[in-house]
Amino acid sequence: MTAAKQAVAPESRNEAAPKLILSAPRADFLQKGYVYVPFRVENMTILPLYAEIHGEEVTHLKPRIGHLHVKVDGNEWSWIHAQTDPIYFSTLPSGVHHLSVELADAAHAVIETQTMELVVP
């Protein structure tokens, strides 16, 4: 597994910056082509609240509200992961794959991006 970090959105000067921590994928799941990646987020609460649905005021809530954007193998499309359960999906064919996870605020502004290489036997 390799991981890369990239900060994108500016942080507030009054509070600690949100931080995304990805754990290693579960090897027993990868053996079958499934991806199971535990994660945690510091200084932000993961909830399914979005500015375009719930109004711009959700971008000003304290603690900050956010979610993840998940992409596989450089695809333009992504899905939103707005819960604290591990990132879990299936099935990937054998080979090397790349998982990109963006930590975003309620207005989808990206705060941090991490990428991870996954090898499915």
Image: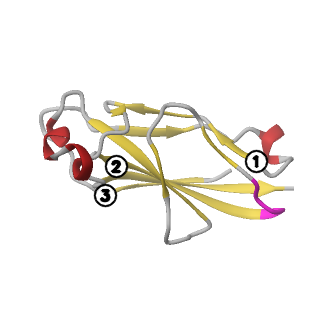
Task: Tell which circle, 1 or 2, labels the residue nearer the N-terminal end.
Answer: 1
Q: Which mark is residue 8?
A: 3
Q: Is residue 42 above or below residue 77?
A: above
Magenta segment? 91-95
Q: Is residue 119 above or below residue 54?
A: below
* Mark 3 → mark 2, Cα distance in angstroms: 10 Å
Q: Categorize mark 3 by other alpha carbons within 10 Å: few (<14), some (14-19), many (20+).
A: some
Using residue 115 as the reference point, say whether residue 102 is left or right of it: left
The residue under label 3 is which amino acid type? Answer: Val
Q: Which mark is residue 34?
A: 1
Question: SS at mark 1?
Answer: loop
Image spot of residue 3 (x, y percent): 57, 52
Judge from the rendering whether residue 85 lies leftward or rightward of residue 43; answer left or right: right
Viewer-side label of 1, 3: 1
The numbered dot on residue 69 is: none
Pointer 2: what residue? 104
